[in-house]
Amino acid sequence: MLWIVTTQWRAQATGYGGDPNARTPYLDALAARSVNYLQAVTPHTFGPFARAALLTGVPSPQNGVRDYFDPLPEDSHTIAHALADRGYHTAFFGKWHLAERNRRAPLVGEAHARTLVPVSRRGGFQDWEGFESGFLLNDPWLHGSQDHPLPVQVRGYQSEILVDRLLNWQAKRKQLEDIPWFAMLSLEAPHPPYDAPANGVRPRSPDSIVLRANVRRGGAEEVQARRELAGYYAHIEATDAAIGRLLTALPESLLVVFTSVHGDMHGSHGLFRKGWPYEESVRVPLLVRGAPSAQGGVTECSDPVSLVDLFAMTLAWSDGVPWRCEREDALISMPSIVQLPHQCDRVWEGRRSATRKVVTTAQGEAWMGFDLVEDPFEQRNLALPAG
């Protein structure tokens, strides 16, 4: 089994989802052979919270990650532990973002990219090669394998390098064909910096980008959205190609999950980055190929599935049985304020179904409410009094 987890790749930014800007031929091909969870959401719209929930099946802050800089507790029971108990060999490649970090160091750059993740803090994965964070989409620093106990810089595009690492690992374990395996490929792209080189993919002209209807035209927000989206879609195209190379090299019968830990606003509602309860930040792609299906052959599913469900979903699949969503909506929340530029300015909690979303503040006051069928661009806030 394989989880492919990207960062900041919102559900709307796929070719198979109808985005005219997104060149994703390999993911389009995967979608044609997968169950596409149309209403999948992240439980939390910031990376560390979402990653902790994804790995443990427990939302934040209950999983111990309450603040942006909180590490995953050392005694956390993760999907790696659970699958190892079922006889799987487990491996992790890429961005971790759940270790102890220097709060005063720049988020982008070598300080966090070279942060050492101790064996005891690697979530129980038997093989682990990656980096804490740092957002170096090119020339990442990797450590954790037997060859690299300390961080070493590897030249090239991060997505391609991590695909190489996973394929090398898979080739070396072929003598263990009778032992099932689970790997998580954790990619930073298409996270900013959006102007970083994208493995030879040339960004299109900002003027050619088709904006969502809820991006205001004629001002600085439009200029910024077009500029950033040009780079964003270049990294989407480059990472799609890397994922395509990986899937081409692996057996067609392999169970594959593709998703992202959260999205990005990109100027929608006048906002940038994430943390907000809007669809651009909350809704994520989720494709599942080769799993026992409770959908009876249906290739699109509108159940309110959350990334926090992937723990239980994967365990069910490992037992050879389907998983079915039994609830009417999914929890979404921002557990704490992250003191970074352009991010959400309050703690909030909400419930989202396939048709409706209601969000309250930490004090329990109504903040946002939307009918997602009648108002897909969330222009009419039903939670606030008229006028």
Image (cartoon, rainbow, N blue to C red):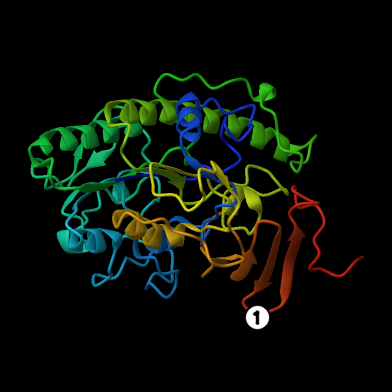
Residue at image point 15% right, 32% down:
171
Q: Residue at (58%, 36%) from the top-left corner?
A: 13
Whether residue 235 is situated above or below residue 191 in the rendered picture: above
Left-right relation of 143 to 230: left
Q: Nearer the viewer, residue 339 or 48?
A: 48
Q: Position of residue 266 (x, y in %)?
A: 63, 42
What is the x, y in percent for residue 3?
Answer: 35, 46
Is 153 on the left or on the right of 223, as rendered? left
Q: Tell me: residue 171, above or below residue 208.
A: below
Q: Give the percent coordinates (x, y) of residue 311.
A: 37, 60
Q: Nearer the viewer, residue 382 or 27?
A: 27
Residue 51 rendering spot, x and y as whole percentages: 39, 58
Q: Quadrant of residue 81?
A: bottom left
Q: How many marks?
A: 1
Q: Quadrant of residue 55?
A: bottom left
Which quadrant: the C terminus?
A: bottom right
Quadrant for residue 196, please give it: top left
Mark 1: give few (<14), some (14-19) or many (20+) Cα within 10 Å: few
Q: Secondary structure at mark 1?
A: loop
**Residue 137 or residue 283, whichever sits in front:** 283
Q: Which residue is mark 1?
A: 363
Q: Amino acid at mark 1?
A: Gln
Left or right of 336 on screen, residue 366:
right
Q: Taking the image as drawn, is residue 342 in sight?
A: no
Nearer to the camera, 355 or 8: 355
